[in-house]
Image (tube, helix red, strand yellow):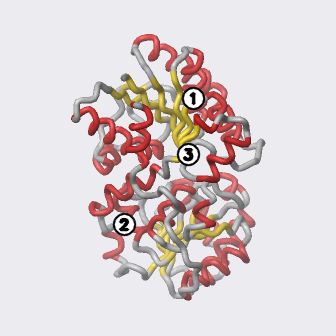
Amino acid sequence: MNICIVAGARPNFIKVAPIMKAIDKVRSQGRDVNCKLVYAGMENDSTLEQSLFDDLQMRRPDVFMGVDCVSLNELTGRVMGEFEKYLEQNPTDVVIVVDDLASTMAAAIVTKKQGIRLAHLVAGTRSFDIKMPKEINRLVIDGLSDLLFTAGEGASNTVSREGVQRSQVYQVGNILMDTLRANYGRLRRPEVLDQLHLDQGQYLVFTLNRKALMADGDNLRLMLKAMLEAAGDTHIVAPLRDNAKKVVASLLATINVPLDKFHFVPPMGYLEFGYLTAHAKGIVTDSGNVAEEATFNGVPCATLNSYTEHIETVRTGSNVLVGEDPQRLGEAVADMVAGRWKSSNIPDRWDGRAAERIVQILLS
């Protein structure tokens, strides 16, 4: 069997790594299976530093499609063209696409046009906001897929309600937990914690990526103020990337609260960031991936969004949704600092064996 895995952005590789390891394992046991990893972007993509692949213990992509453009429609068309060339030159039995990017949708469309089996990793996630480009991508990809690998019962029920046959839906668990569990013993304490003289449970972590949040400067300012006031003497460690750091720094300069406990730190690799969040007192984030890992680690997490693609993090896990409401954020941070948080558990099948289940399904 010839398997092709398509990745469209850096976060995809964290979900792809355990599948490639599972494929290598069954091949070492004598199964006739091969895997090619194809990346939609450029070979010199600055987000794909070698340390990422070293941390994940995986090889770099076998093929780079070389698509690099801002317009989502142009990106979709160019990925379709490049991926069609790849499939024409490389015999492929099944294509696995990850998440909900424009490049993911493009690869899915080409796969089905070529009459090749399509598998969607992390299927069934929905915001139920059709104005979101990613929501359209999700609907298209799930509608085309022959195999839908979901992280939980909520996602499985969603695609079933939309008309997908239950025989096509496989609740395999959350693939992120495979990577986290496999690397837990390798997590590295960041040097910055020593520099700040912080031990585990003595700090909060703050991350920010959503453009919509950063675009509303007036409200983000109120949210930052509420977070800082509620945190009090608890340190906040913020490994923000350039644009987010610039936005937050400019807003902090206008807030009349002490900033000596708020620390901008450089973005971290997977193993260091994993340690940072796993040993935090609490997390404030707009990242679904960070919230999912917080649930696995049992760390209190406040998500700056009104929905989550994985409702299990809220129903079962340690996550709460505070939306973009400064008051709710302040209350959540106050609860974190005071040690008042809901009891939580790890959702069903978030056990680090999702990749093993996926490969067995593909081979059966």
Q: Secondary structure at mark 2?
A: helix
* Residue depicted at 27% across the width and 39% down the height: 25
* Residue depicted at 64% across the width and 72% down the height: 224
The residue beneath circle 3 is 150
Q: Secondary structure at mark 3?
A: strand
Tell me the distance, in whole angstroms, between the alpha carbons under discs 1 and 2. Answer: 37 Å
Q: Amino acid at mark 3?
A: Thr
Q: 296 above or below 82?
A: below
Visible in this render: residue 356? yes
Front position among marks 2 and 3: 3
Q: How far from the left and from the top, in percent, is residue 220?
A: 69, 66
Q: Amino acid at mark 1?
A: Asp
Visible in this render: residue 47? no
* Residue depicted at 43% across the width and 82% down the height: 202
The residue beneath circle 1 is 146
Which part of the image, by quadrant, shows the N terminus? top left
152 relative to 49 in the view: left or right: right
Q: Residue furthest top?
A: 88
Tell me the distance, in whole angstroms, between the alpha carbons under discs 3 and 1. Answer: 13 Å
Q: Nearer the viewer, residue 331 or 112?
A: 112
Q: Amino acid at mark 2?
A: Tyr
Front position among marks 1 and 2: 1
The residue beneath circle 2 is 275
Tell me the distance, in whole angstroms, between the alpha carbons under discs 2 and 3. Answer: 26 Å
Q: Nearer the viewer, residue 108 or 193?
A: 108
Q: 2 above or below 102?
A: above
